[in-house]
Image: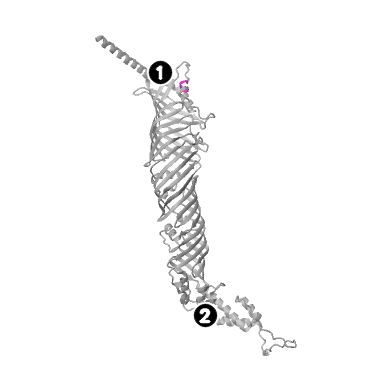
Amino acid sequence: MKKLIIILFLLVFLVVAGVGGVLAYAIMNANAIAKQYKPELEKMASDALGSKVTFGDISAKVYPTARLAISNAQIESDKEKLTLDRLSLNVALLPLLQRDLQVKELVLDTPKITIYLEKDGFYIAGLPRKRSAEGAPKVASADAVSAAQVSADSSATPLSVTLERISLKNATIALVDKTANKTHVVKKLGAKAALAYDAGVVRLSSLDGSMTILEDVDVKFGAEDAKLNLEGGAFEIGEATAKALGNAFKVTGGIDPDDSKQALRITSDRVDLASLGPFYDVFAPGVNDLGIKGLCKPDLTVAWTPEGAYRANGTVGISEASWTVADIPLTKMQGTLNLDATDKGAKVTTNDTKGLLRDAPFTLAVDSGLKDKRAGLETVTAKIFDGTGTLNTSIDLEGDMPFTTKLSLIDMKIEQVLPALLPDNPSNISGTITEMSGDIGGTFNDKLMPSITGTAKMHLADGLIKEVNLGKEVLGGVTEIPFVQGALLNAVPEGMRDLITKPHTALESVTATYAIANEQLQTEDLHIQSDYFEMDAKGTIGFDTKLDLAAMIYFNKDFSAGLASMVKEIGVLFDDQGRLAFPVKITGIPPDLKVMPDVGDLVKRAATGVVKQEVQKQVEKAVGGEVGGIVNKLLGGDKKMPVAPESAAPAPDGTTPPAEAVPAAPAEEAPATPQEEVKKTAESAVGGLLKRIGGKKP
C-alpha cells in the first residue's frame, strides 16, 4: 500500500513538474516566441486584407492569462493608412507552443477608422478601394493560412490560426461623404462578437454593442446568426435589433452586392416622430422648426450595390401626427406613405392621408420627391374647404427652406380658407373660389406670410361682403352736388329701396389678377359684379382683407333710370351705356369700410355736362344749321346734326320764288358773324349756369 501511494505521488509530481517546466519555459521565452511569429502574422494579415500590414512591437504575457499585445499596427493601401494603436490577442498558451495560435479574443482598443464615400462608391482608408479583376481583394483561406511559410527555416511547421471572439473598445468611425462635403462620426463604439471563420466566411453567433452617433445619440444593438462573406462582401442577419431615442427597430435579411434581390428589412412597431430631432438637424435642416409630433410605423427594405449605391423602398404608416407651418397647424394626420429612394434621390407618394388644417378636414394625394437636399412636391392634390387644390412645389430643406410653387384652387369656400390661414383676422367675406391659379414663392419658416411673392388670378362667385352694402354707402356719400338736395340715397325710388336696405353686398362675380408682395395683393383690374351695380377698381387687398382701392362704380340701367326719374339733373353723370357712374375710394377691413365718393370729380363732370347742354340749346336756338352742328361737335354733345330749314317749293313756271326777306340791320351796326353769335350765346349759357350753381361770370 505504501508503495502504491509513493508511485501515485511521483506521477503527480512529474505531471506538475512537467507542466510547470512548460509554463516556466513559456514565461521565460514568451516574447521570443511572439517575435518569431511576427512575420507570419503580417503576411497572413496582408493576404487576408489585400493590403500591406505591418506590426510594431509584439509582446507576450502568460499571467494571469496568455496575451499577445501588438502596438502601432498599420494597414496601408493606395498611399492611405489605417493605424491601430493597441491590438491584443488573448490566446491559449499550450497550443501556442505547438505553433497553433488559438485566439480566444481579438481586442481592438480605441481604433480610429475612416470610411470615404465618393461618387463611385465607398472604401475604408487602408483597405483596397476597388475590387480586383477577379472579383474581390484576395483573402487567405484556412488552407492557405495553414500553408503560409515565411520562416527562414523552410522546414518549420506552418502557423495555424483560429479566432473565437472579437471585441472593439471605444472605437471611432468617421464617415467622410465627399459627395456632400460632410462628415458623420460614430464614437464610443464598443462591441463583442462570438465568431467562427471558415473559407473566407465569418459567422457571428452573437453580437452585442453600443455606440454614439450624431454627437449625443446613444444606440444599443445586438444580432444573432450573422454571416459575412469576406470575399464577396455579402452578409446575412438572422435577426438584429437596435434601440435609439426610445425607439426599437428590428433588422432581418441581408445584402449581396452581386444580387440586387437580397435586401435588409427594417421594421418598427412604433417610432416617436418628436424624438427624431437629431436626425432632422442633420438630414433635413429646418424640419425641427415645424414641431413634428406623432407616431410612425416603418416597413422598409434596403439594398446596396458594389459601388456603394443603395435603394430603399417600402411604407411608413403615420398616426396622430402634427406639425405647424408659419403658425398654421396640421393635426390628426394619418395615412400611409409609400417610399422609393436611392442614393440619387427619393420618391414619396400617398393616396389616403387625411387630417385637419386648423379645424378644416382634408385628404391628400401626394406625389413628391427629394434630391440634393431639395424636396419637390410634384403633385399634391388636397380635398379641403369643400373644394380641391393642387400644388407643384419645390422646397430647399436647408436654411430658411425657400420654396416656389404653382397652385390651382377650384370650388373652395373662402369663408373657410381665410379663418384657417388667418385666424387672428376674421373675415366678413364669403363665396366660392371657382378658380384661382398662381406662381408664388417664399420661405417655409415663421416668416412665411411676409415672404410670399408672385402672381395670381382669381374668380369668386356667389359671395357676400357681410354687414356692408357698398351701393348704399356710395349713394349715401354723394352729397354737396349743387343740383341735388341732400344725398342721392334719399332719391332712390320706393320700388328699388329693397336693394339698398339689404345688410350685405352681393358678389355675383369677382375677377382680378394680382401681384403678391408685402402681405398684399396689388391689382389693376379688379371687377365686381353685384345685383344692382358693378365696379372696376385698382389698388391693394391685404392678406387680412384690408382694402385700399380706387374704384369706379356703375349702377345698372334700371336703377340709374329710377334715380334719374327722381333727380333729372343726374342725367349728366351717365356713361355712354346709360349707367350712373361715380368714382369712389374704398378703404378698411370689412365690415368697417369707408366708402368715399369723389364729390369734386362729380361736380366737375356735372358742370361740364350742364354747360354742354345749355350751350347746345342756346346755339341751336340762336344759330342752328351748320354752325350749331360744328359747335355741338366741339363741345362733345349729342352727335345728331340740327336739321336745316327747308327751301321754298318751285313755282309752276319752274322758277324758284325768292326767299322771305330778312330785315336789314341798321346802317350804323354791321351784322354779327356766325362765330360772334356762337361766342355770345356760349357766354350767356355759361353765365346762366354759374349763376345757378352760385358762381360768378368771368
**Residue at horizontal 53%, vertical 81%?**
692
Snapshot colouring: one colour
Percent across and percent down for residue 268 are 39, 41
Q: Residue furthest right?
A: 653
Cβ–Cβ under 8 Å for marks 2 and 1: no
The kind of residue on which mark 1 rests is Gln
In 3D space, how far apart are the residues under numbered discs 2 and 1 (Cα atoms)? 132 Å
Residue 385 vertical placement versus 593 (above, below): above
Check the picture and name the quadrant holding the N terminus: top left
Front-most of residues 397 and 207: 207
The segment highlighted magenta reads 144-148
Percent across and percent down for residue 437 are 51, 57
Give the mark nearer the N terminus: 2 vs 1: 1
Front-most of residues 340 and 10: 340
Residue pointed to by mark 2: 693
Q: Nearer the viewer, mark 2 or mark 1?
A: 1
Q: Is residue 580 left or right of residue 97?
A: right
Judged by its main secondary structure, the magenta piece is helix
Percent across and percent down for residue 669 are 66, 88
Q: Which mark is residue 332?
A: none
Q: Which mark is residue 98?
A: 1
Percent across and percent down for residue 460 are 49, 62
On the question of residue 430 being in view, the answer is yes
SS of the residue at dot 1?
Answer: loop
Check the picture and name the quadrant holding the C terminus: bottom right
Q: Is residue 453 left or right of residue 655?
A: left
Q: Is residue 658 left or right of residue 443?
A: right
